[in-house]
């Protein structure tokens, strides 16, 4: 993730290099800076980190790795992972897909684009799933589909709530029709959990699009979204090509969805643990253990 | 097994005179009454829906409408539904459940419409909701892919007990054009994409996604629309009879398992 951010900053700085050198701007090591992709303001990385990677100017909530998200969400040492070793095969013999997966695994330390498991949040037990956009833009193939399905089935069996932090570029094209079917598989498991009376909270994070938006990300009993994140079905470029005109800046943001009636609330990352645990409490889930002091 | 490549199938389903639901509905069903609107926003002509009899059994019919010419295509938005189309489909699916009618869906779309209004009205939510609700709809659901089944926009009418495909139909995660556009930034390479993507009826049968391949006359459906309709009809009558024998819990359990088992991974 950080590499991506740095790269983004570097790319932007490279674009501006000439301009800068002419203006004789003071030399600041680029890796110490973060430039917000939403409002373009630049600030020190440590300030950005202190704010849990949110923009001090516009409050855009930047992308987190699954590990970073887990660390700021679950009670310390409470997380028990599911299906850690599940890995993708190559159902349509797509050229170089295995190689791609292997490379991503080495780069991210993840087996695929979602981490699932059980944890407590301020003492409340929940099944949790976190998608990580560093892994092939968190596209959904067999592994994402199967892990999310199993997480819901486990939650149904154990009468637990499910909290999913979604992020995705959509279905994983390299798995062809098999990836499309994951939309049905996951949605079926969500429906069974719902019919059994289970609570499902979706937290839409940057960016949630395509087949994930058109399946489990839109099926939460309660749908929260982080500020300024991108959420939509079709890609911005595809729409722009279709309608041949420029789209407004706030199109497909969390705020756009709130106004259109498709999310329940915008939720700030820095109070997410409180928001989630409060919702769990209001659904009569009982607190267990007391190991939740750090937040 | 057909010996054609995906590209050759693509050429056949792009035939100007390939029959559409406008040809098939009158040929397969009797007493068709069309119902309009989603009761919330409007009526979407990209999806036609209503009730009819199939071999004297009342059924609900939900169909994506490919136009036969430019005028028809303009009206039906080239068979790319908006959210209100999917919501009309769901409204009539619930109605079918209430009155114990089997649901027959015809899939024929390059994908759900991508546009500002579609986003604003929740295209993703509309598709997601159909997928989840069809999964537990307490009546038999049969989907038939007639031509092109593209992405979530097709799946929203394809969560079913049995999925059939016409012999030359294609069903894919994204249209070959979209695939080429994303992968190679060149939509004109759609034929190359089609051959790579494993999207023919035979491919989907081998993946366990397609349950039945309905034969087309030699050369394709357009060479003999009446015979094609007859083949579809014959399949539908047998499928309705077969599925109606199951009690609802078994039907729903089988439907869940049909999708539950799809995935290729190691652990
Ligand atoms: Zn900002």
Image (cartoon, helix red, strand yellow):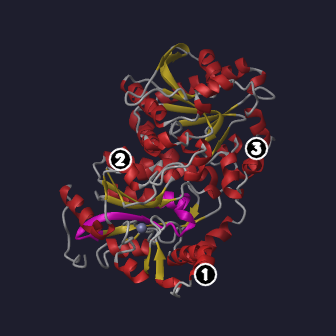
Does the image show residue A112? yes
Looking at the rendered image, the quarter that the C terminus of chain A falls into is bottom left
Mark 2 — on which chain does it sit? A
Residue occupying the point 63% across, 27% down: B73
Q: From the viewer's perspective, tell me whether residue B230 is left or right of residue A262.
A: right
Measured in 3D between alpha carbons, the distance from the residue under mark 1 to the one under mark 3, in whole angstroms, is 56 Å
Residue occupying the point 50% across, 59% down: A168
Residue receiving disc 3 = B6
| Mark 2 or 1, nearer chain start | 1
Label 2: state its secondary structure. helix
* Range shown magenta: A120-147
The magenta stretch spans residue A113: no
Does the image show residue B2? no
Picture coordinates of residue A42 (x, y %)?
45, 75
Count how many numbered circles sit on residues in the image: 3
Label 3: state its secondary structure. helix
Residue receiving disc 1 = A22
Same chain, labels 2 and 1: yes
Measured in 3D between alpha carbons, the distance from the residue under mark 2 to the one under mark 1, in whole angstroms, is 44 Å
Picture coordinates of residue B261 (x, y %)?
52, 51
Residue occupying the point 50% across, 49% down: A233
Label 1: state its secondary structure. helix
Mark 3 — on which chain does it sit? B
Q: Nearer the viewer, mark 2 or mark 1?
A: 1
Outermost residue to the front: A23
The residue nearer to you, when weighing B236 against B154, is B154
């Amino acid at each position: 993730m950080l590499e991506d951010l740095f790269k983004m900053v570097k790319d932007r700085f490279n674009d501006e290099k000439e301009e800068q050198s002419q203006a004789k701007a003071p030399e600041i090591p680029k890796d110490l800076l973060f430039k917000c992709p939403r409002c373009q303001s630049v600030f020190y990385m440590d300030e950005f980190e202190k704010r849990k990677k949110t923009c001090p100017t516009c409050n855009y909530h930047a992308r987190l790795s699954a590990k970073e998200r887990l660390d700021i969400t679950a009670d310390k040492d409470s997380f028990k992972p599911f299906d850690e070793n599940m890995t993708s095969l190559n159902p349509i013999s797509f050229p170089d897909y295995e190689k791609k997966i292997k490379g991503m695994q080495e780069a991210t330390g993840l087996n695929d684009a979602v981490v699932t498991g059980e944890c407590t949040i301020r003492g409340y037990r929940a099944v949790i799933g976190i998608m990580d956009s560093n892994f092939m833009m968190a596209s959904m193939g067999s592994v994402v589909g199967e892990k999310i399905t199993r997480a819901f089935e486990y939650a149904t069996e154990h009468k637990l709530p499910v909290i999913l932090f979604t992020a995705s570029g959509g279905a994983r094209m390299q798995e062809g029709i098999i990836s499309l079917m994951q939309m049905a598989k996951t949605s079926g498991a969500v429906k069974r959990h719902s019919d059994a009376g289970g609570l499902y909270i979706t937290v839409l994070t940057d960016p949630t699009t395509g087949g994930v938006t058109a399946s489990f990300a839109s099926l939460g009993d309660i749908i929260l979204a982080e500020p300024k994140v991108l959420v939509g079905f079709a890609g911005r470029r595809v729409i722009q090509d279709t309608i041949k005109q420029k789209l407004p800046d706030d199109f497909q943001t969390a705020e756009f969805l709130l106004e259109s009636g498709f999310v329940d609330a915008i939720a700030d990352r820095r109070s997410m643990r409180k928001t989630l645990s409060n919702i769990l409490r209001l659904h009569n889930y009982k607190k267990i253990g007391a190991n939740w002091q750090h937040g | 097994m057909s010996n054609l490549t995906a590209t050759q199938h693509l050429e056949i389903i792009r035939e100007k005179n390939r029959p559409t639901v406008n040809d098939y509905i009158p040929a397969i069903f009797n007493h068709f009454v069309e119902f309009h609107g989603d009761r919330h926003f409007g009526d979407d002509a990209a999806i036609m829906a209503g009730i009819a009899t199939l071999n004297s059994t009342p059924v609900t019919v939900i169909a994506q409408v490919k136009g036969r010419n430019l005028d028809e295509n303009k009206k039906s938005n080239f068979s790319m539904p908006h959210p209100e189309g999917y919501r009309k489909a769901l409204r009539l699916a619930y109605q079918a459940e209430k009155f114990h009618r089997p649901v027959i869906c015809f899939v024929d779309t390059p994908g759900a419409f991508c546009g500002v209004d579609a986003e604003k009205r929740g295209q993703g939510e509309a598709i997601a909701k159909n997928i989840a609700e069809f999964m537990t709809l307490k009546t038999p659901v049969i989907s038939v892919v007639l031509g092109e089944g593209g992405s979530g926009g097709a799946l929203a009418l394809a969560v079913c007990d049995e999925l059939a495909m016409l012999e030359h139909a294609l069903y894919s995660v994204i249209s070959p054009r979209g695939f080429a556009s994303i992968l190679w930034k060149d939509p004109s390479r759609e034929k190359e994409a089609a051959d790579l993507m494993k999207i023919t009826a035979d491919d989907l049968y081998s993946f366990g996604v397609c349950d039945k391949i309905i034969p087309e006359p030699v050369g394709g459906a357009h060479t003999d629309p009446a015979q094609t309709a007859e083949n579809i009809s014959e399949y539908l009558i047998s499928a309705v009879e077969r599925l109606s024998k199951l009690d609802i819990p078994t039907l729903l359990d089988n439907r869940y398992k049909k999708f539950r088992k799809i995935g290729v991974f190691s652990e």
